[in-house]
């Protein structure tokens, strides 16, 4: 019981620290976690007062300048690494913080986002983003990114994979709309999914149910 409670508390602290924005996030970035020395030279990699390495990426191990928000080597977000390194290594390993499938996917999505912002978008990255968003059950985002992919890379070899992800996302969006009794909206999602994949029996069955419910209104 105590172990579970400890895990919950530590995880809560990590989530709060990672998702805080503004002055709190900036303070974490330019204040040494060991001696609280205020860093003025953001080009440094270690605290000039105590020698603590401030911005080491826990994904690939690269030591970055304090100013970096993303790792210069693997493009992973450094905010989580800065927070995780304030937690005792044994505790971190015991609780396997950051090692869940969803945590790993979020890291990879952050890497893709950083590369996109740098103008390094490729069909491989764009399709991978759609695939990961689908795995995270972020149906709306996956659908929108799939539409963007089709517009930017109509001849890409990853088109079939992206279409498969979009069909699944549309089917799930349709199902969620049905749960909210929004059958007209559900019909639109499901019809679009069937246009993309006419042989999808799951979508066809949902559409039939949704259309029958719509007739009752």
Image (tube, grey):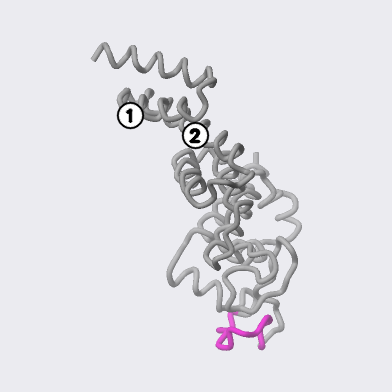
Residue 13 against residue 215 in the figure, above or below: below
Provide residue 96's location: percent of width, then percent of height.
Answer: 71, 49
Dot 2: within a 10 Å radius of its alpha carbon, few (fewer than 14), some, or many (20 or more) residues? many
On the image, numbered disc 2 is attached to which residue?
A: 169
Q: Quadrant of residue 216?
A: top left
Q: Please tell me which residue lies in front, 66 or 189.
A: 189
Majority SS type along the magenta span: loop
What is the quadrant of the N terminus in the image?
top right
* Residue at x 58%, y 84% (from the top left corner): 42
- Badge 2 marks a residue whose secondary structure is helix
Check disc 1 and report the residue beneath it.
185
From the top left corner, tell me how far across and down residue 84 is, in percent.
Answer: 64, 61
The quadrant where residue 185 appears: top left
User: The C terminus appears in which quarter of the rendering?
Assistant: top left
Where on the picture, by quarter, is residue 214? top left
From the viewer's side, name the closer residue of 200 and 49: 200
Q: Please say whether residue 42 is one of the residues in the magenta stretch.
A: yes
Give yes or no for residue 148 being in the magenta stretch: no
Whole-percent x, y for residue 114 in the image: 56, 63
- Tag 1: Cα neighbours inside 10 Å, few (<14), some, or many (≥20)? some
In the image, taking residue 142 as reference, residue 105 lies left or right, namely: right
Which is nearer the eye, 33 or 105? 105
- Residue 6 seen in this snapshot: no
Q: Height in image: 13 above or below 52? A: above
In the depicted view, which residue is nearer to us: 61 or 203? 203
* Mark 2 → mark 1, Cα distance in angstroms: 14 Å
Q: Which residues are magenta?
A: 36-48
Q: Which mark is residue 145?
A: none
Query: How many numbered discs?
Result: 2
């Amino acid at each position: 019981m105590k172990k579970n409670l400890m895990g919950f508390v530590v995880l809560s602290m990590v989530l709060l620290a990672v998702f805080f924005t503004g002055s709190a996030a900036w303070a974490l970035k330019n204040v040494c976690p060991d001696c609280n020395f205020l860093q003025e030279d953001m080009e440094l990699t270690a605290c000039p007062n105590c020698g603590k390495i401030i911005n080491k990426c826990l994904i690939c191990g690269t030591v970055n300048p304090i100013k970096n928000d993303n790792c210069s080597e693997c493009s992973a977000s450094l905010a989580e690494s800065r927070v995780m390194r304030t937690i005792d290594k044994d505790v971190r390993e015991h609780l396997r913080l950051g090692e869940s499938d969803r945590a790993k996917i979020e890291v990879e999505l952050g890497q893709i986002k950083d590369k996109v912002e740098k103008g390094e978008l490729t069909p491989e990255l764009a399709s991978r983003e759609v695939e990961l968003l689908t795995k995270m059950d972020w149906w709306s985002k996956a659908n929108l990114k799939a539409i963007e992919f089709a517009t930017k890379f109509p001849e890409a070899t990853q088109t079939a994979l992206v279409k498969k992800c979009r069909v699944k996302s549309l089917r799930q969006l349709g199902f969620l709309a049905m749960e909210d009794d929004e059958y007209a909206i559900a019909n639109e999602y499901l019809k679009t999914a069937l246009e993309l994949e006419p042989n999808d029996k799951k979508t066809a069955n949902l559409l039939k149910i949704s259309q029958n419910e719509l007739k009752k209104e």
